[in-house]
Structure formats: structure tokens, C-alpha cells
Image (tube, rainbow, N blue to C red):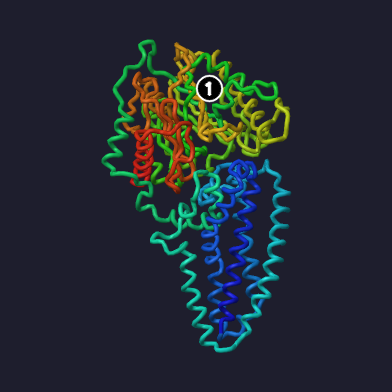
Amino acid sequence: MFSRVLFCALYWLMWTAFFGVARVGFLLANWDEAVQSGIKQSLGAMLNGARMDMSMAVYVSAPVFFLAMISTWLTVLRTRNIYVIYTLCVLFPVLLLLFADIGLYQSWHARIDGTFLRYMSNPSEVWASISHLPILWIVVGFLLTYLLFFMWMRKLVRQFTLHLHNMHQPWFQFVFVLIWMGIMIIPLRGGFQLAPLNQSTVFFSDNHFSNLAAINAPWNFVHDVLQREDESKNPFTYMEDARANSIIDSLYARPLLNRPDTLQPPVNVLLIVWESLTEKVVDLKFKGVEVTPGLNRLTRESVYFSNAYATGDRTDKGIVGILSGYPAQPTTSIVKIPSKASTLPMISKDFNQAGYQTAYYYGGEPEFANMKAYLMQGAFRHFVTINDFEKKDHNSKWGAHDGVVMHRLLSDMKKVPSPFFYTWLTLSSHEPYETPVPARIPGNDHESRMLDVMHYTDSIVYDFITACKQLPWWKNTLVVITGDHGHPLPKRTLRSDNFRIPILFTGGAVEQFIRREEVVSQNDIATSILWYASLSSSSYRWSRNVFQHNHPGNAFFTFNNGFGFASGDRVFMFDNLGKRLIEYDTVPGEQALVAGKALQQISFKDYLDR
């Protein structure tokens, strides 16, 4: 009478075992981190992650449970091919998620969730991001893995289905399968605890990698996609809003300061947003080559902020951080929802209203990550993008390389009337790390290629600045150079270093050159630019003037479901899932930790309320 229950149990255990093997694969794919964590931590990830594996196995097996239950009366459902075909169909997307998870983790240091779906609306941009990878070998590896697991599962399923042909006591078999499905609610929700299974349920260690390894990737993806449908309440509530707002008010107090007397308005503004420009490349020599010699020279003729942090880890977040002075969200991006993004202040709007000529230059497609809608709401009077260049100049997988765009921009700026606010977003230093010129830094590894494209863009930006110095408007122009976000390469011990970016205020309008060591945020650029141009910044709550004498010296940034906070000479990162610190150079004081939580809570509440 238990034959059908036995079939269901074996099928569920098969999928549970499969997810356990997948976790071993994840650990092997990230061997360096697994070895650094230690064998005990890896075993802990396997053991604790089994709860999530069993839960995901229930989701995958639930249709089979139902078919097995009604097969008592419908003989056609006892055919083994039905279960073999179902297994074949389900295995493909599950394995696809597992493969994608390995690649995304190595780029984002987070397990796969719904975040990457934001970028899937533009296939050409996605292809440009991954085309540097050995796609053929990845596809071959995927197909071979799929074939191997399917052959194993097919053999097991064919053996399991023998139990479906037992017709003894059909009513009892029906009832027992029904009871089995009820029992499966326990592993489905992760046990008998009051709260249902979530990511923090399987967290067990002080080692962040081991905790992430315990997560079941397909479960994490499905859970995140379903959870994001409801944004009616703030998941990052750590204290009363009144207390959090009070803390933020103290961090963002903005006394009025006059502009320097030596500046005569109106000042022109040229904003250069350098793709993936990380502070780690400044003054770096690699294989005997100075990676950014031009930028290094510019730091000595600028107000150079060497301890700045990007607000997020993607271009769509960085652009909003720069133009709107708005913090990034840890689980989404505001530009994906135009109705929310349209409520943001934008310095391009302010300059447009002040009578400035405004333009935005980018050699690729601005539609990526829905940025076009955001930018068009920013009152830029003129756009130059991939469609404005001839096909022969589409010499990058993203569009036109920086050299092509630079020559177009320089040509246009020779004719632009003052005052103007021009923005240029570079693209050559994005994956797939290719340049239209011979490599200066040899090597085919990712680090060598990434640093070589940095060297290429550096030469373009420096030549551009050198040419601009000869133009009549230079003496009354502020040039701001910064990164849209940092980069995991070159590798450093602290992950928080991946968020550090240089910020340079240079140009003829800047008369005193100095290196500034205090902590500042990418979000502070907006208010600082407006101050230079004598324009109001009262609507930029999350942006401060870096030239204020009492700038508090801190920065808040977010990553995939977590946040970081830098203050003085200390920086830490906090995981929202496990609700714990995952990185710090020195243990942060309670005041700094509470400040970071308050910023996470209120900034996300602000996003929800828009």
C-alpha cells in the first residue's frame, strides 16, 4: 500500500541529492575561497544547506507527487516516459540557473537572484558583457553536464516508476500519497520553526563565503523573484523611523557656504563618468607598465578625493548616484521603474533650467537597464549615442570605442556656446576588455586585459583633457572625472575596496590643487557641482558638498542585499540576509553600525515612497 509513497520519496531524494552535488560544484568552482574557508566550513555549508536543498526538491517534485496520487485511477499516468520527460524539462532550467550562478558569483560575489533579470531586456548589451568568456566551452560543458545528469536521473526514474504499477489497495495508496504531500510541507518551509525558510535559516558561520555556499541557487532565485512582487513594506527596518531620520539629519546637515570668490559665474561643467574606474588602478604599475599615467598626472592638478566610495556596483546605480545624488538600492534599481525615477532631482535639469547647453555622450545603447527613460527625463537637450556613429565606427561589442566618441565630443565642444553642462559616459573599460589598438599590457587573463583597457581609456581621456585646455572656454570650466562604480579587479584583501573610486575636480575653474584623504561618497558629486555653479542643491537630500569644512567624512554604499559604511579610517560591510557584519577592517562602533542601518532603512523607504 506504500508503493506510490515510496516512488514519491525516491524522486524527492533524487533531487535533494542532485542539489547537494550542485553545491559541491559551486565549492569547486570557487576553490580558492573554499580552501581559505577550510574543510570544516565547506562541510558546514553542505550540512546546513541541505535544508534548502530539500525545500527546493519539494518544489520541483510537487507535480510528480500529484500525478502519482491520481495515477491510482488514471492508468496512463503510470507510464514512465511521462516522468522522464518531466524530469528532462525541469533539469534544463535548473541546471541553467546553477551554471549562471557560478558566473554571477565570481562577478558580483552574490548568489543568483532576480537582479540579473533587469539586464536581460537588452540582449545585445548582455552579449557584450559575457562575450569575453569562453562561451563555446561553457556551452559544451553545460550540455555534457546536462546529458550526464539526465542519463543518471532517467535511469533512476525508470526504476522508481516500477512502484506505480502496484495496484493493491488503491484507496489506501491515494490517501497515503495525500498524507505524504502534507508531510512535505515540513521540508518545504525548512522545518518546524515559526518563520518559514529563508536565506538566513541556512547561515551558520562567521565566514561569509560559507554562508553563501549553503544557499540553494534555484531556491534563492525563485524566492527573490516572487518576493519582489510585493514592495509594500520596507524589509530593512532596524529601528523607529523617527530615530533613523534623526541620525540621517545629523549626517547630512548642510550649512550654507559661499562659492570661492575667484570664480565668476556662470561656470561650464564637463562631467566624465569612466566605466569601472576603480581607485585601485591609480598610481598602479602592472608588468612594468603604468596603468593610468594620464589620470595620475591629472590627480596632481586637481582637487583629488582618493577615499571616495561608489554608491553601488552597476552603471545604472552609479549614474543615478552622480546625476541625482541618490543612493543605490540593495535589491533593485530605481531606473527600472520610470515613474519612481522621474521624481528624482537631476543636475542636468537644474543646468537646463539655468540656461545651460546640456548634452549626454555615450558610444553604446542608452536603453540598457532602462537608463534611457531616466536620462530623457533629465532635460538633456542633446544625446549622442551608438546610432550617431557610422557602422564602421561600431568597433566595440558595446558600440563605438572611447576614442571614436572622444573625437566626436571634442569636435562638438569646439563649437558649443557657454555656459554648458556636458556628460560623457565611457564604455571601453567594460567587459569584454577589448581595445581597437595593440595591447600595452600583455596577457590573456582577466586582470591583464582589464588593466589594459584601463590604460587605453586613460590615454583617450588624457588626450581629450589636453586638447580641451587649448579651447577658449577652458579657463572657466569645471571638469569632474569619476567612475560609475568600482571593480573587483585588481584583487585586494578587502571587498570594500571594490567600491572605491577616484573623484577629481579639475579644469580651469579649479585654482588650488590638493589631495583630499577624507571619506566622501559618489552621491556627493551632485551637490558639489551645483555649488561650483552657484545653483541650489536643496532638493538633494542624499548629497553633500565635499568642499564644506565640516563634511562628516563618511559614505554609504550598497551591494546585493547588503550595505557598506565608511567613516574616518574605518569601513564595514553588513549582510541584510544574515543580519550580520561580513567584513570590517576594525570592529565598528555601535554608532557607526546604527548609522549604516539608518541609512539603509530610510533610503529604501524613500525609494518605496516615490
- In the drawing, does residue 86 fall left or right of residue 191? right
- Mark 1: secondary structure: helix
**Front-most of residues 158 and 31:** 31
Evaluate whether residue 473 shows in this view: no
Residue 466 at x, y = what percent? 58, 16
- Based on the displayed image, in which of its 4 quarters is residue 414 positioned? top right
Q: Quadrant of the N terminus?
A: bottom right
* Badge 1 density bin: few <14, some 14–19, many ≥20, Cα 10 Å: some
Residue at the far left in the pictured view: 242
Q: Is residue 246 above or below residue 43?
A: above
**Numbered marks: total:** 1
Q: Quadrant of the C terminus?
A: top left
Q: Amino acid at mark 1?
A: Met
Residue drawn where x is 35% and y is 53% of the image? 232
Q: Is residue 84 above or below residue 122?
A: below
Evaluate whether residue 277 shows in this view: yes
Residue 260 at x, y = what percent? 36, 14
Residue drawn where x is 29% and y is 21% of the image? 256
Residue drawn where x is 38% and y is 13% of the image? 264
Q: Is residue 10 above or below residue 587?
A: below
Residue at the far bottom in the pictured view: 169
**Front-most of residues 482 and 223:** 223
The residue that disc 1 covers is 413
**Front-most of residues 41 and 513:** 41
Residue 27 at x, y = what percent? 62, 49
- In the drawing, does residue 286 fall left or right of residue 266? right
Residue 602 at x, y = what percent? 34, 41
**Front-most of residues 302 and 577:** 577
- Based on the displayed image, in which of its 4 quarters is residue 511 positioned? top left
